């Protein structure tokens, strides 16, 4: 069942309606929370762990929202409010089952993966074609794309015109997810850059500030740092670098009370030091599940760590690790978040 659902999640483009494509037999909605590994997995593994997490969190979020739009209750995972479009009661009464929500998630994730993991497209399209699916429908539906993401009347009309079918609601769910990702502080498209960086950019008092203000609007409060960063942002117009930093942070080399860039090598003579993996999102980052106000109110008791002792313990463990091949393999496995996640899911399904 897991394999069947995974294949569907990454390959099922078949046309409108509430029925699965010919040759695909329900039930395939038995595990609607599993995000698509399969063909997209090796491309996800090419990313650093935070980006892997972002991809998996995004694909899982649209699965959740597809469940929500076919239920009479439940809140949107991004806004924590009523979904901007929800199927009408007749549709929910007739088709509000696991198979329908799974189909919606299949559509949404296909569109989302096309956006968030574009290097997987060729492999995905080949998989669609091999299974006899229409491999061309990986974009947001034109009637949905014509609407502003906040225009519920326009989006509702697009959904009604297609009878709230999974294809159209999946497209709306994906549209919303992509809008969230474009304003989540990660600068995944590399479109925002500091004007002081040099290179090709244009002033963006409207475009970049709207992105930053949209991102920070979900926070409980704004900061002066937000304003300082926003005033220095421009829009990249050439040679844009995905996930590039927009804060201008520079490490304090030699100050060991602060973060120091890690030096690594590839084992064959190439040495390098880390700059950053993804941008610092403390100013513009948006939370998925827990509001910032809730996070800020949380506290815990002082654990009473003796950091000198803890440092010595780390050094001792590293000395043991240097000659322990078994532990090296364990570290390598658990450093692969996708492998760990897959192992947990398979053990739960066993």
Image: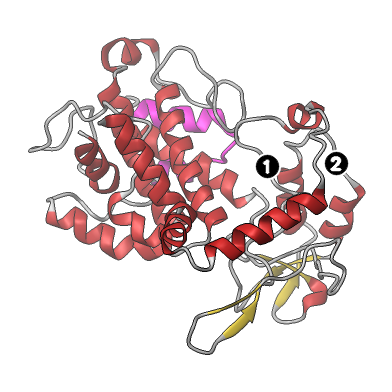
The residue shown at (22%, 45%) is 7
Classed neighbour count for the residue bearing mark 2: other residues with Cα under 10 Å, few (<14), some (14–19), many (≥20)? some
In the picture, the disc for residue 243 is none
Write down the region rendered in magenta: 142-161
Which of 171 and 295 lies nearest the eye of the viewer?
Answer: 295
Left/right placement of residue 322 relative to residue 173 reads right
In the picture, the disc for residue 222 is 2
| Nearer-N-terminus badge (2/1) | 2
Residue 315 seen in render: yes
Is there CB contact under 8 Å for labels 2 and 1? no
User: In what element is the residue under mark 2?
Assistant: loop
Which quadrant would the C terminus be assigned to in this image? top left
User: In what element is the residue under mark 1?
Assistant: loop
What residue is disc 1 on?
A: 286
Left/right placement of residue 288 relative to residue 94 reads right
Q: Position of residue 39 (x, y in %)?
A: 28, 55
Q: Position of residue 302 (x, y in %)?
A: 83, 32
Which of 24 and 271 lies nearest the eye of the viewer?
Answer: 271
Q: Disc 2 and disc 1: Cα gap in Å?
A: 12 Å
Instruction: Determine whether 66 is above or below 255 in the image.
Output: above
């Amino acid at each position: 069942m897991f394999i069947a659902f995974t294949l569907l999640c990454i390959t099922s483009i078949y046309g409108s309606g509430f029925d699965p494509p010919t040759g695909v037999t329900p039930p395939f909605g038995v595990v609607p929370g599993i995000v698509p590994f399969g063909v997209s997995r090796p491309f996800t593994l090419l990313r650093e762990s935070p980006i892997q997490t972002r991809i998996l969190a995004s694909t899982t979020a649209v699965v959740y929202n597809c469940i929500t739009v076919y239920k009479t209750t439940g809140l949107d995972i991004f806004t924590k409010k009523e979904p901007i479009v929800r199927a009408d009661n007749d549709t929910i009464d007739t088709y509000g089952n696991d198979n329908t929500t799974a189909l919606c998630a299949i559509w949404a994730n296909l569109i989302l993966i096309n956006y968030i993991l574009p290097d997987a497209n060729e492999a995905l399209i080949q998989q669609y074609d091999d299974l006899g699916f229409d491999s061309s429908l990986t974009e947001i539906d034109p009637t949905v794309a014509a609407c502003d993401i906040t225009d519920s009347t326009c989006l509702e009309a697009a959904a009604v015109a297609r009878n709230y079918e999974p294809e159209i609601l999946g497209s709306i769910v994906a549209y919303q997810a992509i809008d969230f990702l474009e304003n989540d502080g990660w600068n995944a498209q590399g479109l925002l850059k500091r004007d002081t960086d040099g290179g090709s950019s244009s002033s963006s008092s409207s475009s970049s500030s709207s992105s930053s203000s949209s991102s920070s609007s979900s926070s409980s409060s704004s900061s002066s740092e937000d304003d300082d960063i926003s005033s220095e942002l421009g829009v990249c117009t050439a040679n844009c670098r995905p996930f590039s930093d927009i804060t201008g942070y520079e490490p304090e080399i030699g100050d060991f009370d602060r973060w120091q860039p890690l030096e690594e090598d590839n084992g064959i003579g190439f040495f390098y030091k880390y700059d950053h993996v993804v941008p610092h999102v403390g100013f513009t980052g948006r939370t998925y599940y827990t509001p910032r106000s809730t996070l800020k109110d949380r506290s815990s008791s002082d654990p009473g760590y003796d950091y000198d002792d803890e440092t010595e313990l780390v050094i001792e463990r590293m000395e043991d690790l240097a000659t322990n091949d078994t532990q090296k393999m364990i570290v390598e496995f658990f450093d692969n978040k996708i492998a760990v996640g897959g192992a947990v899911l398979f053990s739960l399904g066993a």
